[in-house]
Amino acid sequence: MSAEPTPDVRTVRLGLELRHIRLEQNLTLQKAHKLLRRSVSSISRIEKGQVRIPERDLPPILDAYGITDPARREALLGLTRRNDAKDWWQSYRDVLVVYPTFISMENEATRIRAFECVFLPGLLQTPEYAWEIFAAGVPGRSPLETKRLTDVRIKRQQILDRAARPDVHVIVAESTLRQSVGGPEVMQRQLQHVLTEIDGGRVGLQVLPFTAGAHPALGSFNILTVPALGGDIVHIDETNQSRFVDDGAATRRYLDVYERLRAAALSEDDSRQRIEHLVFESQAQAKGRPRRA
């Protein structure tokens, strides 16, 4: 039996819409369970975008919720119809336990804002840098799995090659630039790659320096502007799970945090100079280090 396709951005959007409809009707999950004759866990998974609903199964749900407007029904039905042409990540289902929904959203985003305080953003990583991260992530991870995860990370970067690429702006804590992933040679090439991406106009980048002191972010996060989701959604990347925030008030808080980080960070020009300096540092360290066998 083939594996079930991973959820995509339309599945997430449909789940959000169905949750909003349920709340508009003042229905708890328990009441919806009785109304729809579906288990609470099934309804919850649908609303979280974790499972796809076949097109034929949606009309009875809309009937039960009292959704009769033809235009609204057709819009919701449209979210059940897939376009497999874009879904390249489906072939990596064996290793993508956490990220497929995020990749789907990233693939359709028109604007991406990211704050990273541990590693450099995936959209800017070189293959060797990404390999080191995945190899260190899980004890005993096989070289094949590490390679496939690295391939996914690099393939995500194809969105930056589009004629209509998303507007990408990232803020990185200075510690991410100084964390010696893979040693000075790897870091030298990684930092040079970041400079190339900046100079090519593919991303905007600011460095949050050590001297900025305390800041309002509790960890790394992404803000994706996805038209198919009706606006901004926040993605929080945790150790073994992805979490999405779509609540309006919570999203606005993350937008405020991002703008405060942006104000505290170095300008884009000063950030570029900081990275250039670190490239020279890495070069000096690499010259004084014995080569790997």
Image: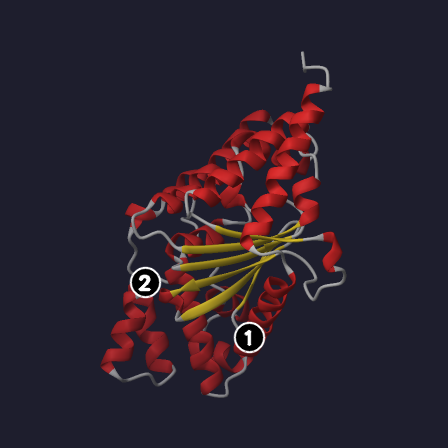
Q: Position of residue 92 (x, y in %)?
A: 45, 39
Is 123 left or right of 91, judged from the image as shown?
Answer: right
Which of the 4 image quarters holds residue 67? bottom left
Residue 53, by quadrant, is bottom left
Whole-percent x, y for residue 154 in the image? 47, 37
Q: Secondary structure at mark 1?
A: helix
Q: In the rendered structure, which amino acid carries the disc numbered 1?
A: Arg
Q: Residue at x 30, y 73 (%)?
A: 59
Do we see residue 96 in this rendering? no
Q: Rate crowding at label 2 as few (under 14), some (14 to 19) or many (20 or more) other CA atoms within 10 Å.
A: some
As drawn, 2 above or below 106:
above
Find disc 2 in the rendering and name its residue: 80
Label 1 sits on residue: 252
Measure how far apart labels 1 and 2 are at the Cα level: 29 Å
Q: Residue furthest top?
A: 293
* Rendered residue at 72%/59% (across/down): 212
Q: How many marks?
A: 2
Q: Secondary structure at mark 2?
A: loop
